[in-house]
Every structure is written in C-alpha cells, then in structure tokens.
Image (tube, rainbow, N blue to C red):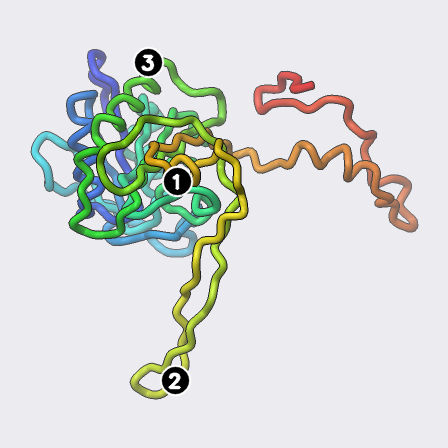
Amino acid sequence: MKKDMNKPVILVVNDDGITAPGIKNLIEVMQPLGRVVVVAPDGPQSGMGHAITIGKPLRFDRVDLYPGVEMYKCSGTPVDCVKLAVNKIFKGKKPDICVSGINHGLNNSINVIYSGTMSAAVEGAIEGIPSIGFSLDDFSQQADFSFTKPFIKTITEQVLKNGLPEATLLNVNFPKGDGLKGIKICRQANAKWSEEFEERSDPYNRPYYWLTGYFQNNDKGEDTDVWALDNGYVSVVPVQFDLTAHHAIPILNRYDFKVEGVKSTQNTPPTTHHSLDGSSLG
C-alpha cells in the first residue's frame, strides 16, 4: 500500500457488514477527503465488542462494490478488520485516520463497551491511528443518513487537521431526524441497559432465550451524550482505552493486603498519577 502524498489515506471499517447502507454513506463522505481503503466484515458483527478471532482461519478478499474504492471483506470481527488492514494491506505504514460506521443504532453511554463499531475505532487508536466511530439512532436498513454527512465531514476534517490527544479517540452519535442544533462535546452518561431474557420455545419445544430490556438513564447531567442526543445535538465523547481507575489507586493502597508468609504485597501509595506518555497528572 503506497500513500498518495497529496491525499490522506482513510481506513473505513464497520460492524454491520460491508454491504450495510451505513458504510456506503460513510464512504461517500470520505471519498472527497482522501484515498479510501475499506476493510469490513463479510456479515453483521454487532455487539462483538473487542473480540478477535483465535484458533480458526481468517480470510479477506478484494471486492468491487463502489467505483474507485479499494475494498476488502473479512471473515472476522471488526477488530480483526483493523488488525488485518494494518498488518497486511498497509504493511505497517499506518493510514492517516480510521473511521468506523456509520452504525445502525446508537453507541452512546454504556453501549460503547459492547459496540463492534467503537471497538474497531479503539483498535485503530491502539495502533496509533487517529480514530472516530460514527453511529445513528436508526436501526432501519432504509435509514436516512444524509443529514449526518456535513457533520461527519467537519469532524473528520478537524481530526485530520489537528489530530487527537494521545491514546484518545472520538465516539460520535447522531439523533434520528434532521434539524440538528449542532455539536456538543460530552462525557459518557452513567446509564445502562436493564436486561431481561424472554424464554421461548423452538419447534421441538426446547427452551431458548431472547435478550430484551430497556435503557435506564440515572444520570441527570446536562453535559452527557444522552442529554445531547435527547435535545437534538450531535454528541462527541472523547474515549480512551486505558481502563485504569486512577482515582482508586490511593484508596486501594490503604487496604491491608498483607498475606501471611509474604513479606510485602503492597506498593507505597503513589503521590502522583501519570498519563500514558508518562507525564504527571498531579
């Protein structure tokens, strides 16, 4: 893979599959911005999170779906798609940006953990590539993505121009319907799914279970992604893949973790926190 020196190279991925309408719309936004390379699952992979394929072969094949676009379908997960792109297509020469989506359905709040769309973007960030995940609050295969395109273009251009903080990516969500009020930089809402498993019977009268439930938001803040979406804004949440709860380290260091027969199992309580690049956070 050789970079066109005059154009940024854009890796496009998703979790809904290479033929999903969402990725077609994302490709259309990206084409004027740079050289587009698509690596996407050969079928739906929603809810796969950061799963990777281990213990069985991975395959990816060149396909021609859209004129002027280099495209590959992959038998694996969204994260597999990014790993294969970096290692086998780009051969270690990273693209300038990785964009994932446009997902059919929101990935706000706790959904970011389960999302294949966002996990592909997270993998891009782990590889040191500025990465963005885009999602729309519409599961329909006939979803209207047209009103999201100017926002996606602006956000992508700004990231290409300014980059992102180290080890950070963006989670971008759109409410359904046009007439958006603008973009809000938000935090992830403290909200979750209250899950239920509906018991059903197959034709042989054997029980099986279907996951259902409802979204429960206990976060009343007006600086969250849930609030922004409910009020007609595009939500942009900066996400990091360092899952360390830094604020809990001093608390845990006050616990008595002494083990009988072991001289010491605890560190001295730290006085400072550090970012991923080693700089002090105070």
Q: Residue at x 65, y 22 (%)?
A: 274
Instruction: Assign the C terminus to one quadrant of the image.
Output: top right
x and y, in percent, of residue 220 in the image: 52, 41
In the rendered image of this protein, does residue 198 appear above or below residue 137? below
Within 10 Å of disc 2 (Cα), the crowding (few <14, some 14-19, many 20+) is: few
Mark nearer the N terminus (2 vs 3): 3
State the residue position of label 3: 161
x and y, in percent, of residue 193 in the image: 47, 55
State the residue position of label 2: 206
Mark nearer the N terminus (1 vs 2): 1
Q: Indicate the amino acid at tag 3.
A: Lys
Q: Nearer the viewer, residue 87 or 113?
A: 113
State the residue position of label 1: 118
Within 10 Å of disc 1 (Cα), the crowding (few <14, some 14-19, many 20+) is: many
Mark nearer the N terminus (1 vs 3): 1
Instruction: Assign the N terminus to one quadrant of the image.
Output: top left
Q: Which structural element holds mark 3?
A: helix
Is 274 displayed left or right of 134 in the figure? Answer: right
Q: Which structural element holds mark 1?
A: helix
x and y, in percent, of residue 48 in the image: 39, 52
x and y, in percent, of residue 66 in the image: 10, 37
In the rendered image of this protein, does residue 67 appear above or below residue 207? above
Q: Residue furthest bottom?
A: 204
Q: Are marks 1 and 2 in contact (CB under 8 Å)?
A: no
The reply to whether residue 116 is visible in this rendering is yes
Mark 2–mark 3 distance (CA, rounded to whole Å): 57 Å
